[in-house]
Structure formats: C-alpha cells, structure tokens
Image (cartoon, rainbow, N blue to C red):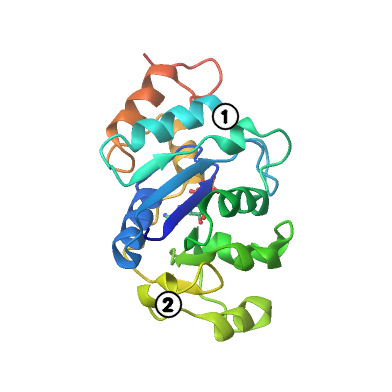
Amino acid sequence: MGPLGIFGGTFDPIHFGHLRAAFELTELLRLDSVLFIPAADPPHRGKPLADAATRLAMVRAALEDEDAFEVDDREIRRPGPSYTVLTLEELRREQGSRPLVLLLGMDAFLGLPTWHRWRELLELAHIAVAHRPGAELPSTGDLGRLLEAGRARGREDIAAAPAGRIFDHPGTQLDISSTDLREALRSGRDPRYLMPEPVRRMINATGIYARPGETEG
Ligand code: ATP
C-alpha cells in the first residue's frame, strides 16, 4: 500500500489553503489517501468558535468531491487533549509498517518543539511541510538540525521507510487562514472563493461565525 497522509487541524473553518496544500502533497508524494482529523480540544490554542461536531460536519462537506480525502473523527471521540503523538501511535498500530505522512503548514512545523512528546513524532511518521506565506523554513535550532539530518528529496525517500524524513513543498501558497475567515465573517464579509461552497452554505445557514445576535438566513 502507498503512503497514508494525516492532516490534523482545528478546521475552524476548513478552507482552500488546507485543501490545496493536502492535494499538492498527495500528488507529489503519491499518497493513497489523506485522513483529515479535526482536533477536539486543541492543546496549543484557545477554544474553537465552532464546536467539534460542526467543524467535523464542515470538513465532511468540504471533502465530498475528492475520493482520496477522508474524514477521521478519532480525536473528537477520544477523551482528553488531542495530542498528535497519540493519534500517530494509534495509526501506527493500525497500519503496520506502511509509510505515514503527517501534513503540516509551515507555521505548524515551526511550532513543533512545543508539541507534546514532539521528538517521537518523526519516529512514528514522516512530516510533509507545505510552505505558507510569512513563514520561512528554519535553518537553525532543533528544527534546522532535524531538516539537515532527515530532509527527503522526493517521494522515493518517503516510500522507502515508514517514518523519519521531512519533505517540504513550496507549492501554491494561498494566503488564507481560518483566523482571517472568522474575522471576515464576523464583519459580515462573504468568504466566497476562499472555501468550498458546501462549507460556505453551512456557515451562512447556521450563522456560526456571525457576531452574537446577528445570525444570517
Ligand atoms: P487559524 O488561523 O485558526 O490558526 P489555520 O488556517 O492555520 O487556522 P488550522 O486548522 O489551525 O488552520 O491548520 C491545520 C493545518 O493546516 C496546520 O498544519 C496549518 O499550518 C495548515 N494550514 C492552514 N492554512 C494553510 C494554508 N493556507 N496553506 C498551507 N497550510 C495551511
């Protein structure tokens, strides 16, 4: 079996920046599929605006048209903080020696040393980093050293081992973030062309991100 991609996030809400990065990495690394795993209780940040069930429903709606993308609700079902290392341990047990590839945006990669048991992540999976506007690939420190030691040149390096390499992809860097989208929605602006239409329709129908007391129809 080919490598399996794992894309965790808050997805509050999911947008084309997430989807394009996952799609380009799927093509480049010949991933069989990508599991989108919404976090229940993200350990690194404040409480999401949309609840877990709503974020899960938005991700499901966003992935409707892409057979290679699947939703996985294990972090929402699992009690306690959504530590990625626990998710990767579970997936490693399920997938045997299949290459696993944790997909991260550059900002998330730069924050990696603050993650729970972060050094174990590369023992459990490869990491593929999508460049993102405003965040540079590190050349010093722990991450700089890791890159120097384990940078993958291409899909062959990823397919050749279950875990341990870091691949980075400059790709199409869409300057879209959930933070900007929440702010736009709060101010009554339309997120059209920044996210899949089914997600936009859910947001409009429920008014999840509207200013309190201002629900759109
Ligand atoms: P927020 O603005 O609320 O922090 P976000 O847009 O960064 O949200 P998350 O759900 O926190 O989205 O991110 C999940 C993963 O997707 C992270 O690894 C993040 O780096 C990556 N990601 C988010 N937006 C992009 C983008 N535009 N391009 C590439 N990767 C992205």
Residue 167, image quadrant:
bottom left
Callout 1: helix, strand or loop?
helix
Q: Residues within 10 Å of mark 2 (few under 14, many from 20)?
A: some
**Residue 123 percent coordinates (x, y):** 63, 67
Q: Check mark 1 vs ligand 1: CB closer than 8 Å? yes or no.
A: no
Q: Amino acid at mark 2?
A: Asp
Observer-side mark, 2 or 1, equals 2
The residue wearing badge 2 is 157
Q: Earlier in the sequence, mark 2 or mark 1?
A: 1
Mark-to-mark CA distance, 2 and 1 = 35 Å
**Residue 107 percent coordinates (x, y):** 55, 62
Which residue is found at the position 44% from the left and 55% from the top? Answer: 5
- Residue 17 visible somewhere in the drawing: yes
The residue wearing badge 1 is 52
Q: Amino acid at mark 1?
A: Ala
Looking at the image, is 144 positioned above or below residue 184? Answer: below
**Residue 1 percent coordinates (x, y):** 37, 58
Q: Is residue 34 left or right of residue 121?
A: left
